[in-house]
Image (spheres, rainbow, N blue to C red):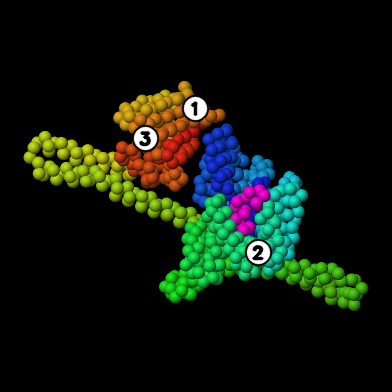
Amino acid sequence: MKIYFILSVCLISTLRLFAQNPRTLDSLFTRVESGNQKERINTYVAIAREYRQINADSTNWYAQIAIQKAELFKYPKGKIDALYEIGYAADRTGDYTQAVKLFNDVIAQSDSINYTIGLTKGYNGLGLVYELQGDYVNALHYHLLNLEILEKLNDRPGMAMVYNNIAIVYKDQKEYDKSLESHWKSLKISEESLDSLGMAISNFNIGHMYQLKGNGEQALFHYLKTKEITELINDIYGMGKVHHSIGDIYYSDKLYKKAFDYYSKSKAFFEECKANTDITDPLIGLGKIYLQDSNHARAQQYLSQALVMAQKTGHIDNIMNSSELLFQSAKQMGDYQKALDYYVLFNTMKDSTLNSEQIKQLTLLEAEYNFQKERASINYANERARMTLDQQIEKQRNTQNASIVGMVLLVGVLIILYRYYRLKKHANLELQLLNAEIQDRNASLSNLNAEKNSLIGIVAHDLKNPLSNIIGAVGVLKASEKEEEKIKFLDIVQASGMKLIDMISEILNVESIEQRVADLDLSSINLTEIINDVIDQFDQQAKTKNVQLVRDITENVHIIAHVTYVSQVIENLLSNAIKFSSEQKNVFINLSIDQSQALIEVRDEGPGLDEEDKARLFQKYQRLSAEPTAGEDSTGLGLSIVKKFVDAMKGGIWVESEVGRGASFFVAFELA
């Protein structure tokens, strides 16, 4: 991952500096419960955006919630914004094929509803992903399309951002002067707009370009300007980045004391804003300085921390840097076993980097070959056009014949090139489709394997207790001579056997249930009556656990659904709420009308769900971190079946929960 690239990839109209702020996440989570449905969807998209540099899985999770709600409440702009965040996550994790598909979807859907901001996001995403793949022609094409729209909108921060991205394309091709020219344009726009964030970004990138050109003095000048701005606007993450870069300049100049001070401050800033991905940079810097001073104990302390953090975040460059320095330290100390281990790790990472660079270089060579060939044909035509009639009088006939032959040959070459292009494009398309199919099949096999492992775990865990009860009861029966005692233990055997049958039947019937919900006959039903009936059924079970059922049910609510499956959905949610509630707790069942939707909420005061639990909640055979409070049994199938029932009835289901604060399950259906 290129530091330079991270610094310049900003959203279209926000120009957030460098990375996300954990404090912003706290604020967004407090807002997600307030406002109308559109505001809530926008908040979920904002949460997904904030998770970009932290956790791609979390970005996908919250964006999917936003998409589900946007489809349910007919808010296409919210869906487009969420699709962009998923595409951005795919780009960050290296799934470029999926990223291109999603960004094209963003463009198509934005165009269909005339959503200009969505178009700029889609063009921005395609420009970035093509730049990462080394396809600089397409990258520049989409950045220029984006710039054209932003100029019409007079979006000055957006224009500054695009000039930064264009500069990256030139920088990757080692055209440093063109790159600097684009960065200066970006800086000029930011200064005219009095945009402190934009000025900080452009000064940082200009400093980086001078550093690449070997002009440390100019690089330091612009880094110090960036430092001044980030301190003024109190951007903790930005201060962490620029302090690290200043430390690199001083390290290159062998001013190790100054370099140490700046690396230390960079580390402190990253720790303050919890930027785990970036803290590896100053850790490596500090390790280098201690290694330079032959203080191997401290060097290995910092470098080992950097290696662990880089491995957690998948930062290949820093895995290579830290493992190479650890190899040098271990070798100097005579610990050849550790030195060998670090050397193997370094070369493994180096090989993976070389493979990706080779692919990128092949793409560049191919683009350069086509460009030179096209330029040669254009130069040839221009040269012939510049010939004057006087210069060709003596050889007019021969020249005319030669021109005809040349044109025929040129047309023939163009036809061959065109057919080659078409064949290559077709072959690439087939290869992409084949790769996508292979990925889908691999994902399906992985899911099946995970279900198999979960099922084995359930069988091993949940069937163990009934079998133990049977074995124990049989042992007592053999030794007992009292008739009453024999009957008692025979009842235990029978009850345990029935429990085994029930659990096995539930597992075996899952596929049958999934097939039945494929084509339901939906009709208008009275949801109010169904919910009240289900609550009455569970009243005794709740009283047995000393749990209070509190209902707030809107009268005479009718929906389009299936009576049996709606009842099973509510029964499962209410049963789970009681199952995970302790004594003296409440379970709330609410039914309300939200615009054109009937909204059911089942809320408990149980242990709640963490992010990992919520991500697996509606999958089959899943065991969550929380346990039923009275030791009740669970196969992990209930919520997966509930999800299939709700989807089949064209409804929506989601959960909102925090650890230690209970869980609220929401189900929405269209009103009749």
Rendered position, 193 above or below 438: above
Query: Is residue 351 at all visible to an observer of this figure?
Result: no
Pointer 3: what residue? Answer: 581
Q: Using a 10 Å C-alpha cutoff, classify the residue at mark 2 as few (fewer than 14 neighbours), some (14 to 19) or many (20 or more).
A: some
CA–CA distance in space, label 1 to label 3: 24 Å
Q: Which numbered mark, 2 or 3, is in the foreground of this view?
A: 3
* Residue under the point 71% across and 48% down: 195
Pointer 1: what residue? Answer: 592
Residue nearer the viewer, 571 or 656: 656
Contact (CB < 8 A) between labels 1 and 3?
A: no
The amino acid type, in three-letter code, at marker 3 is Ser
CA–CA distance in space, label 2 to label 1: 56 Å
The amino acid type, in three-letter code, at marker 2 is Asp
- The quadrant in which residue 375 appears is bottom right
> Residue 282 location, x and y as percent?
56, 61
The amino acid type, in three-letter code, at marker 1 is Ser
Secondary structure beneath dot 2 equals helix
Q: Which numbered mark, 2 or 1, is in the foreground of this view?
A: 2
